[in-house]
Amino acid sequence: MKRRKQRETIMTCIYQYLLLGTDIDTIFEDNLDLNDKDSIAFIVSVTVDALNNVEEYSAKINNHLHEWTFDRLGYVEQAILLLAASELETGDLDRAIVVNEAIELTKKFCDDAAYKLINGVLDQL
């Protein structure tokens, strides 16, 4: 599975957790392809990091939201920002790649103008 598809899976996992409060084991059962061993490690690592650090990452994101709060954002936007914050925190990838991937996810799954918000916040993180 390509990294972009892996990020879509991570976003979906985070989204389900935020929206439904489903436990992480059930989320992974529903979303992971157990035959794709190479993808599982990345998906699980980033998802678990994002969910374990929701308070920390959302506080950092809140510092860069003007006239909004993290809690007022849609769950998809929240999931994308948490995914990107997790990847930025680990520092494994170039910042430009993480931001670009988050923008592409936003363009695919969110309102037309949402990518501007995501880009603005991530540029400041």
Image (cartoon, rainbow, N blue to C red):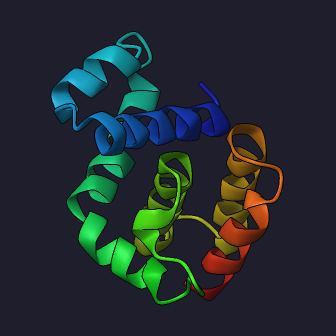
Would residue 102 appear left or right of 70 to someone viewing this image? right
Q: Is residue 67 left or right of residue 62?
A: right
Q: Is residue 20 above or below residue 120?
A: above
Q: Which residue is painted at 20% across and 34% down in the image?
A: 24
Quarter residue 99 falls in = bottom right
- Foreground pick, 21 / 97: 21
Determine whether 102 is above or below 11 in the image.
below
Q: Which residue extends farthest right? A: 112
Inspect this view and state whether residue 6 appears: yes
Q: Is residue 42 in view from this perspective? A: no
In the depicted view, which residue is nearer to us: 109 or 123? 109
Position of the C terminus, as image quadrant, is bottom right
In the image, taking residue 83 as reference, residue 107 lies left or right, namely: right
Residue 89 is situated, as x and y percent measured from the top left of the image, at 42, 73
Reply above or below: 73 against 2: below
Q: Which percent across, then down, holds residue 4?
A: 66, 38
Give above or below for 106 relative to 66.
Answer: above
